[in-house]
Image (cartoon, rainbow, N blue to C red):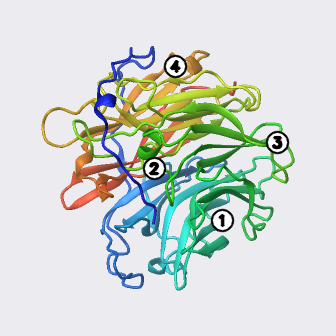
Amino acid sequence: MMRHRFRPLSAALLAVPLLGAPAVTAPASASAPAPPARVSGASPFASCTADTFPGDTYTVGVEAEPTLAIDPADPRRRVVGWQQDRWAYGSARGMVTTVTADGGRSWRQVSPPITLCSGGPYGRIANPWLTFGPDGRLYAAVMAAGLAPLTTGVAVLTSGDGGQSWNAPVEVDADPMAGYFHDKPALTVDPRHPRRAYLVWNRHNTTDQTHELLFSRTSDGGRTWEPARAIHRPPAGDGTIGNQIVVLPDGTLLDLFHEGPFAPGGASAATAAAGDGPELLRVMRSTDGGTTWSAPSTIAATDLGVPVLPGTTTPIVGASLVPDVTVDARGRVYMVWNDARLSGSRSAVALTASSDGGRTWARPRRVNGTPDSPPGGTGQAFTPQIDAAPDGTLAITYYDLRDDTAAAGASTTHWMATCGGPGCVRGEGFRERRLGGPFDLDKAFRWFDGPFLGSYTGLAHTPRGFVSAFVMSGERAGDPQDVYVGEVQTCSGRCHVR
């Protein structure tokens, strides 16, 4: 399915000098969060034989790429979803979710009816995306692949009871797999119009190597969707990834994404970092609910990091591909991504922000507090996510390798850095907390010769703080990796919107 081409780090790259550490996070305090809770378990597809496919194999017990949604009307209702049982050549046998109605004290596993192994029509899925609307309706968007015939497309499911049960999937778009690949759908519900939602993703024409940024919307709570249409066509050879729409307080839509020279089926971080073309973070605006869109403008030029297991050329697959965005209650827009220019390790977390509706942006700053290292060393940080709480506090999560030693394995830690002051955009005032690990990344499921946890994790807020859903590997004998949930309270007493 999605293929990545990797190249070894050159001697010249390994000679890059160390950069000074940013004035950002302090060490985690004694008041660390409680240990994360494991929310994945035995695969519900272990005995399924309906989706067998000649020439491909899967690994039971692999959970990857978690997504998280919290009901804004009742923050006790939370849903985590992930890819379950990865195929060797990409994608998974289905999407599995776990649901809580009591703020995480108890969880119930549910398999939405998407693939053949869960009572749905598709053969496999990838890129799960969950989000709640302000009316409590829950949406799930996935890249969905059919087996007979072989197709690739995007499908959306909805739930009216917080994920306890799901409606049948609605196919938004599909094409023959022989000529196209649909990648990384993201869905946003309009907070001003609860039954309206927006969907964006990339479609790659593998015949002529062109890409289209596709858009669709619903006005009836996900029962029907407008025909998908291209709102941007990058230059030949370039594509988009990480598309995500945010809605500003005045109703303006912004679609933010990364554009660059992507390989078939997605972005190849190694190809981009090797200098095959410019890589840009871009934004498009719509002031009429997505009917028309501006031409893209550039937020920043970037150099994608290519994180590797320390001391090796083994890539951490998918860890630097997808940027993340959020908007706070006052309409300030924030974006994070993996950037090779901001640390000697060549893999850092970058942050920028806009306070004028995405027209101008602050200079990118490094925000991870990882002690720096030479390229490919223990100073690498990757897979950043960002969210903003109602009181304006920012949270950024990421993995890093600061705990790795010369011993066997690759000790990896998942962190949350929070900031609540005006210096956040300058990379100042962040406080780090260890959410999970260290765990051995070298024991993760292998995809194209490197460990794969996913190209994003889950992050969402409650009125009191933030919840993160992430993957750790090597924690249980006989199980490659699992999904965990950690929570940090950043607001006590009365919490104000600012």
Task: Locate residue 437, reporting x and y percent.
Answer: 29, 39
1 or 3: tag closer to the N-terminus: 1
Image marks 2 and 4: residues in contact by CB distance under 8 Å? no
- Which of label 3 and label 2 is nearer to you? 2
Residue at the disc numbered 3: 251
Q: Position of residue 473 (x, y in %)?
A: 28, 51
Q: Indicate the amino acid at tag 2.
A: Ser
Q: CA distance from mark 4 to mark 3?
A: 29 Å
* Callout 3 amino acid: Gly
Residues under labels 2 and 1: Cα distance?
37 Å
Front-most of 169 and 241? Answer: 241
The kind of secondary structure element at disc 2 is: loop
Q: Which circle's residue, 2 or 1, is located before the other in the chain?
A: 1
Can you identify the residue that label 2 sits on?
268
Amino acid at circle 4: Gly
* Secondary structure at numbered mark 4: loop
Comes first in the chain, label 3 or label 2? 3
What residue is pinned by disc 4?
427
